[in-house]
Amino acid sequence: MMLKRGTKGLKRSPLRKNGVASRKWTAFRNAYAEESRDEEGLIRTEPTKVGLPEEHLSLESPDLHHLIGRAERPDLYFEKTNLVWLSREQHQKVHNHEVDN
């Protein structure tokens, strides 16, 4: 877990694709995805939880977004109440601050 200094202050670098932390997150995400699937094998997105006025979607593999980021609260990294399923487009909108909060 490294912090990088960019033009907009400190920014957390993404987890490496290999390593203990990445494997732990991948296992957690996959298990949570299986729990979240409906009878058709799809996961329902929850964009209204992050302030997006968009409709809920049912997708095979949506992104998992942390409501409170891991830089702010690393203790909530694996807390399911801090996670929300979003489509890739919805996830990008949240990280680009295109939400109405």
Image: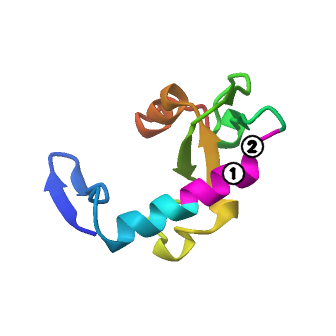
Residue 48 vertical position relative to residue 71 in the rendered view, above or below: above
Say which of 96 and 37 sits in front: 37
Please tell me which residue is depicted at 59% across the width and 37% down the height of the picture.
Answer: 86
x, y percentage for residue 41?
74, 36
Q: Is residue 24 above or below residue 89?
A: below
Marks 2/1 in contact by CB < 8 Å: the verdict is yes
Magenta segment main secondary structure: helix
Q: Which residue reaches farthest right?
A: 39
**Which x, y percent locates residue 66?**
54, 54
Percent from the top left, x then y, of residue 52? Answer: 64, 30
Q: Nearer the viewer, residue 44 or 92?
A: 44
Secondary element at tag 1 = helix
Q: Residues within 10 Å of mark 2 (few under 14, many from 20)?
A: some
Question: For residue 29, which quarter of the picture?
Answer: bottom right
Number of numbered discs on residues: 2
On whether residue 73 falls in the magenta region, the answer is no
Q: CA distance from mark 2 to mark 1?
A: 5 Å
Identify the residue under disc 1: 34
* Residue bearing the label numbered 2: 37
Residue 85 occupies quadrant: top right
Say whether residue 6 is left or right of residue 51: left
Name the spot of residue 88 as percent of width and height, x first.
Answer: 49, 31
The answer to if 36 sits in the magenta stretch is: yes
Name the quadrant of the N terminus: bottom left
Q: Which mark is residue 64?
A: none
Magenta segment boundaries in residue numbering: 29-38
Question: Which residue lies at the image location 60% right of the left edge and 31% below the top edge?
Answer: 100
Identity, as a three-letter code, of the amino acid under mark 2: Arg
Name the residue: 74% across, 48% down.
Answer: 36
Label 1 sits on what residue type?
A: Glu
Is the residue 50 above or below the residue 99 in the image? below
